[in-house]
Amino acid sequence: MAHDDELHELRAMLAEVFAQARRIDQRLCRLEQDAAAKPEPAQTPFAFDAYVPPAPAPPPLPPMPPRTPIAARKAPAGPGAFEQAAGRLRHWAGLDSGLSWEILVGTVWLPRIGMLLLLAALAFFFTFAVQHWGGFFYAAAARGIGLRPVRGIAGAGPLAGKALPGVCARTV
C-alpha cells in the first residue's frame, strides 16, 4: 500500500509539471504573436554624406647628413672578424687544404656524419633498452649509464686526432 501512495504522489507531480509546461507554451505563443504584430520601424536613409576632412600631412623629414664616399673610408689594419670567422670555417670544412672534393667528402665529411649517426643510434638504442628491458633502473642512473659512452666517443675523437695525427683519420 505504501507504493500506491508514492505512485499517487508521483502522478500529481507529473500533472503539475505538464500544467506548468502548458502555461510556458501559451506565454511563448503570445510573445511570438506580439512580436509578429509589431511592425519594425523603417530606417530612413541619410539625405547627405557626412563630410570627412582629409588627414593632415605629416611633417617634412629632416635633411640627411652628408655621406662620406666609400673610397675615403679607412680600411681596418688587419683582417676583420668576418674574415677571421670565414677563414676558421674554411679550415674546419677542409676547403683550404687544396684536396679534390671527392677526397674532401670521403676523408672529412663522411666520417663526421657517420660519427653523428653512431652517437644518435647509441642514444636511441639505450633509450629503447631502458624503456623495454630496464624498468628496474632509476632514471638518473639510466641517464648516467647511457650518456657515458656517448660522451666518451664524442670527446675521444678530437683528442685522438690531436694525439695520434698519423694513425687516426685526418682531422681538420
Image (cartoon, grey):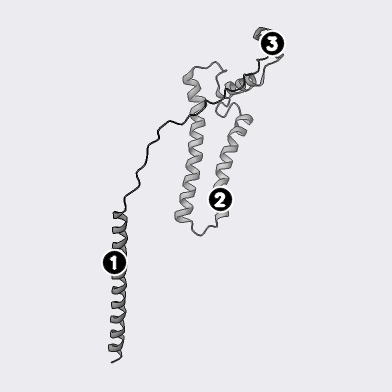
Judging by the rendered image, the residue that carries numbered circle 3 is: 73
What is the x, y in percent for residue 65?
Answer: 68, 14
Closer mark to the observer between disc 2 and disc 3:
3
List the single residue furthest toward the top: 71
Q: With respect to residue 75, does 88 lie above or below?
A: below
Instruction: Name the quadrant containing residue 92.
Output: top right
What is the x, y in percent for residue 32?
Answer: 30, 58
List the single residue furthest toward the bottom: 1
Judging by the rendered image, the residue that carries numbered circle 2 is: 143
Quarter of the picture containing the N terminus is: bottom left
How many C-alpha atoms fall within 10 Å of the one at disc 1: few (<14), some, or many (≥20)?
Answer: few
**Residue type at the position of mark 2:** Arg
Distance from disc 2 to disc 3, alpha carbons, whole Å, reads: 57 Å
Q: Depth check: give the residue in front, 35 or 102.
A: 35
List the single residue furthest toward the front: 47
What is the x, y in percent for residue 138?
Answer: 55, 57
Label 3 vs 1, first from the N-terminus: 1
Q: Residue at x 52, y 31 (%)?
A: 112
How many C-alpha atoms fall within 10 Å of the one at disc 3: few (<14), some, or many (≥20)?
Answer: few
Q: Residue at x 60, y 37 (%)?
A: 155
Instruction: Name the quadrant containing residue 170.
Output: top right
How many C-alpha atoms fall within 10 Å of the one at disc 2: few (<14), some, or many (≥20)?
Answer: some
Image mark for residue 26: 1
Q: Residue at x 60, y 32 (%)?
A: 158
Closer mark to the observer between disc 3 and disc 1:
1
**Residue type at the position of mark 1:** Gln
- Circle 3: element type: loop
- Circle 1: element type: helix
- Circle 2: element type: helix
Q: Depth check: give the residue in front, 1 or 159.
A: 1
**Residue type at the position of mark 3:** Arg
